[in-house]
Image: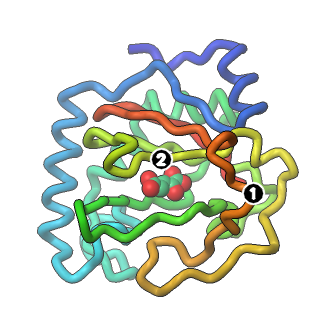
């Protein structure tokens, strides 16, 4: 499947701050990544499954996680890089990779947050590619975004510190986040989402 974006999709990404491309990962690659995910969990019995940071670094990654090269393969997968290139241009570096698993019943909540708090990169114009490896639904905790919340190109000063158990150290205040402004959707394995990271 082509990773080409139309001018209207690129314009929508600039305006809304997120995009769901038509492209989907090839089923055989999704299977390999699911296997790698199961191995990652087995290799890290002492790490919360929401906190598998820098999982793309094979072996002991220096951040307390034993990672897998498979996730670097995902980040470098040519259609994924093509998608990002169409959104931010050809000068691309991989800043990080985070595997969020959401165990039923006892999983930690991912609070509303701005990725810009985590990336020491200015200007705040990075791009996060989120990839579903398993079904991601409203019921089991799919990603939600606030369309247009990137537009003032700054991080909120009123973020609060979260508990050490949270996968995110900063949370946005919940007051302005009315349901009307949120955008939520179900994703099946292999579905990608590009998010402008402010
Ligand atoms: O999948 C999640 O719960 C969080 C993902 C996220 O924070 C992101 O893609 O920036």
Q: Dot 1 surroundings within 10 Å: few (below 14), some, or many (20 or more)? A: few
Compared to 83, does 139 lie above or below? Answer: below
The residue that mark 2 highlights is 143
- Residue 162 position, x and y percent, is 56, 81
- Residue 82 position, x and y percent, is 54, 28
- Look at the image and tell me in which quarter the C terminus lies: bottom right
Q: Secondary structure at mark 1?
A: loop
Q: How many marks?
A: 2
Where residue 4 is drawn, which disc sits there?
Answer: none
For the point 35% across and 67% down, the residue is 50
Residue labelled 2 has its Cβ within 8 Å of some atom of ligand 1: yes
For the point 24% across and 36% down, the residue is 30
Q: Secondary structure at mark 2?
A: loop
Q: Nearer the viewer, residue 187 or 123?
A: 187
The residue that mark 1 highlights is 176
Query: Can residue 27 be seen at all in this image of the molecule?
Result: yes
| Residue 92 sits in quarter | top right
- Residue 135 position, x and y percent, is 28, 39
Mark 2 or 1, closer to the camera: 1
Residue labelled 1 has its Cβ within 8 Å of some atom of ligand 1: no
| Residue 166 sits in quarter | bottom left
Query: Which scheme is used to colour this image of the protein?
Result: rainbow
């Amino acid at each position: 499947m082509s990773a080409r974006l139309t001018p209207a999709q690129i314009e929508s990404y600039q305006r809304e701050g997120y995009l769901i491309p038509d492209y989907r990962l090839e089923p055989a690659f999704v299977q390999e990544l699911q296997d790698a995910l199961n191995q990652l969990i087995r290799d890290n019995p002492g790490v919360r499954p929401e906190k598998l940071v820098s999982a793309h670094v094979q072996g002991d990654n220096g951040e307390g996680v034993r990672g897998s090269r498979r996730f670097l393969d995902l980040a470098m997968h040519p259609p994924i890089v093509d998608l990002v290139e169409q959104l931010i241009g050809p000068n691309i570096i991989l800043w990080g990779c985070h595997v969020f698993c959401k165990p039923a019943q006892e999983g930690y909540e991912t609070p509303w947050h701005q990725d810009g708090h985590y990336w020491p990169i200015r200007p705040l114009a990075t791009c996060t590619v989120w990839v579903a490896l398993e079904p991601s639904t409203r019921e089991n905790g799919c990603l939600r975004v606030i369309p247009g919340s990137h537009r003032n190109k700054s991080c909120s000063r009123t973020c609060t510190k979260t508990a050490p158990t949270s996968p995110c150290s900063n949370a946005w205040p919940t007051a302005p986040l009315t349901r009307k402004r949120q955008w939520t959707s179900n994703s099946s394995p292999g579905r990608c989402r590009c998010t402008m990271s402010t």
